Amino acid sequence: MASEVTFRRVRLLQAAVSEILGVCVSRLTLNEDRRGSLVEAYRTDELQTLFIGQPQMAYISATLGGVVRGPHVHKYQTDMFVFLGPEAFELYLWKESAPGIIGKAERMVVRPCWRAVIPPGVIHAYKNIGTELSLVFNLPDRLYKGINKQHPVDEIRYEDDPDSPFQVPTD
């Protein structure tokens, strides 16, 4: 005899607002039942207007408490980060308002079960604002180094440049 499982759908906040065109940050629906929970990280029907391509690879990064990843930018790649936690992150975004003129940094707190779609040309970084090792799942629409890792990396990194205009505050 099969037992029936019913999920309870919990949607807390709908979305965080970004003034940078093409960036979408949203809270994912947490489906809970007696076994635990399930989150749909990627659905083509939700992201087809934001995520032009399809994910070409997936990876999970583990970030120590207080550590920053980035800032960096991709010329062609769209990132789709799913923040898994257990800690919250600060997400930083920058965009040129005109050639050579960088707009003010946007900063927002993203908690576990939040998703951020970041299109090409948007400088981005995130910082684990907790103390525990926390996970981020990424589904970029480009392969790292291309097919068979034979091509240049589509990334400009700023984190090691002390004169970079893209700075994430440290504690």
Image (cartoon, grey):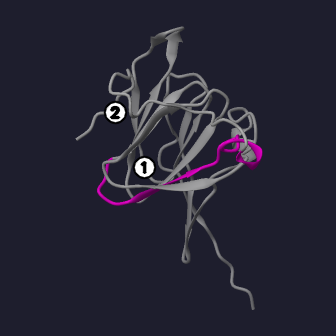
Q: 155 above or below 135?
A: above
Quadrant in which the C terminus appears? top left
In the rendered image, residue 130, in percent from the top left (x then y), is placed at: 31, 53
Q: Is residue 149 or residue 135 the one in the foreground? A: 149
Residue visible at 29% across and 57% down?
Answer: 131
Mark 2–mark 1 Cα distance, whole angstroms, equals 18 Å
Q: Describe the element under mark 2 as helix, strand or loop.
A: loop
Question: Viewer-nearest of labels 2 and 1?
Answer: 2
In the rendered image, residue 138, in percent from the top left (x then y), is placed at: 59, 49
Quadrant in which the N terminus appears? bottom right
Q: Which residue is mark 2?
A: 168
In the rendered image, residue 157, in percent from the top left (x then y), is placed at: 49, 32
Q: 93 above or below 54?
A: above
Q: Tell whether position 152 is magenta.
A: no
**Callout 1: few (<14), some (14-19), or many (20+) C-alpha neighbours within 10 Å?**
some
In the rendered image, residue 153, in percent from the top left (x then y), is placed at: 63, 37
Q: Which residue is mark 1?
A: 111
**Callout 2: few (<14), some (14-19), or many (20+) C-alpha neighbours within 10 Å?**
many
Residue visible at 73% across and 47% down?
Answer: 56
At label 2, the amino acid type is: Val
For marks 2 and 1, the one nearer the N-term is 1
Q: How many marks?
A: 2
Q: Residue furthest front?
A: 150
At label 1, the amino acid type is: Arg
Q: Horizontally, is 62 left or right of 7 in the view?
A: left
Q: Is residue 69 or residue 10 the one in the foreground? A: 69
Q: Which mark is residue 84?
A: none
Residue visible at 74% across and 33% down?
Answer: 52
Q: Which residues are magenta?
A: 129-149
Q: Tell whether position 138 is magenta.
A: yes
Quadrant housing residue 144 = top right
